[in-house]
Amino acid sequence: MNITGPTNHTNSCKPFYEEENPIPLVVLYSTVLTLGLPANLITVFLTFLEVCRKNVLGVYLFSLSVCDLMYLGTLPLWAIYINRGHHWEWGSLACKFTGYVFFNNMYISIFLMCCISVDRFVAVVYAVESRGLRRMRHAVIISVVIVLVVAVGHVPVFTMTEGDSELMEEKRCFEPSDPSVVVTGLNYSRFFIGFFIPLCILIVTNLAIIAKVRASTGLKPKAKVRIRNLALAVILFFLVCFTPYHVILLLRAINFHFSNGKCDFERSVYTPYTISLGLSTINSAINPVFYVLSSNSVHKKIHKGLQGLRSSSRSSSFT
């Protein structure tokens, strides 16, 4: 999958995946779906309860889980597509819609992750002032604006010829193709606006949280370690899931200025590109772990629920 600009269908960059083994990517997509679907269904329910309790952070977490669920719903199509040798069977509209959902999920998730980190930063570093800054209304407005801006920004997906799978002999769906000015501009903007700036925000806010917590005298050592590990894990998780994909986008954009229309670089980077897509997919399964299960309130609810199940099972066994 890749957003590209209009090109003709007699694409000089022939398919790059003739000898690709589809099994690893299919297994990865299946695993992400198996783990991510129940995890996000649970977190949607738990975060909805937090929203009802006027929890500001719950708004961002709920939006993130709903976004991930939408993307997880398209994974079976991508897995079948890869398994059939990159042959799309469901028509051009379905191809464009699944591509649209993929890119929306990636960048809505990235921006919501930034919102979560900023919200935690404000709550920890500016604990007193945050009472006036952190409002439910603000969180809802910000979440809606993020969804609308990203959704509108990716509307051109429906006009791009790379999604017209029915008109292609190979029936491909958003595969890398001839470099173009449009693609190069999109790749630059996606790297800097959709990745580099959010990465800087995540690093600054989470390191500030670590510094503030370390200097605190009111927190127990275990609590400090937990908060520090979570902050570091968020940064590491973001780097692992999104860095490879966006670095390849940047390299493709730079290569456009020196390729003279040749596809040598596109061919050489295709395998790393598919791996980077798989890594970005893991985001949808791990989000609940980092942003919900790490929460004290949710942790206590799950613990109480497990205790209730154990008590019930013991009573049944005794009976």
Image: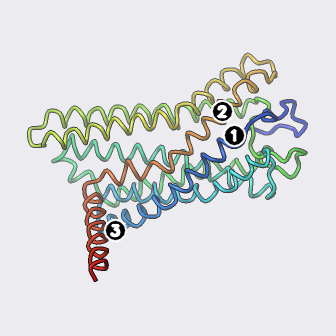
Mark 1: few/some/many CA within 10 Å (<14, 14-19, 20+):
many
Residue 238, position as x, y percentages in the image = 45, 37
What's the colour scheme? Answer: rainbow
Q: Which residue is mark 2?
A: 273
Mark 2: few/some/many CA within 10 Å (<14, 14-19, 20+):
many
Quick check: 129 above or below 255?
below
Q: Which residue is mark 1?
A: 2
Of callouts 1 and 3, which one flags the residue occurring earlier in the amino acid sequence? 1
Residue 293, position as x, y percentages in the image = 34, 54
Type of the residue with mark 3:
Leu
Please state if 92 lies on the left or on the right of 124 as rendered. Answer: right
Secondary structure of the residue carrying numbered label 2: helix
Q: What separation in Å lies between label 2 and label 1 (alpha carbons)?
A: 10 Å
- Residue appearing at x 68%, y 54% in the figure: 98
- Residue appearing at x 90%, y 45% in the figure: 169
Extreme residue toward the bottom, this view: 319
Type of the residue with mark 2:
Tyr
Q: Are marks 2 and 1 in contact (CB under 8 Å)?
A: yes
- In the figure, residue 301 lies in which quadrant? bottom left
Which is closer to the viewer, label 3 or label 2?
2
Quick check: 281 above or below 45?
above
Q: Which mark is residue 49?
A: 3
Type of the residue with mark 1:
Asn
Q: What separation in Å lies between label 1 and label 3 (alpha carbons)?
A: 37 Å
Picture quarter with the N terminus: top right
Please state if 87 lies on the left or on the right of 50 as rendered. Answer: right
Secondary structure of the residue carrying numbered label 1: loop
Q: Which mark is residue 226?
A: none
Secondary structure of the residue carrying numbered label 3: helix
Of callouts 2 and 1, which one flags the residue occurring earlier in the amino acid sequence? 1
- In the figure, residue 189 lies in which quadrant? top right
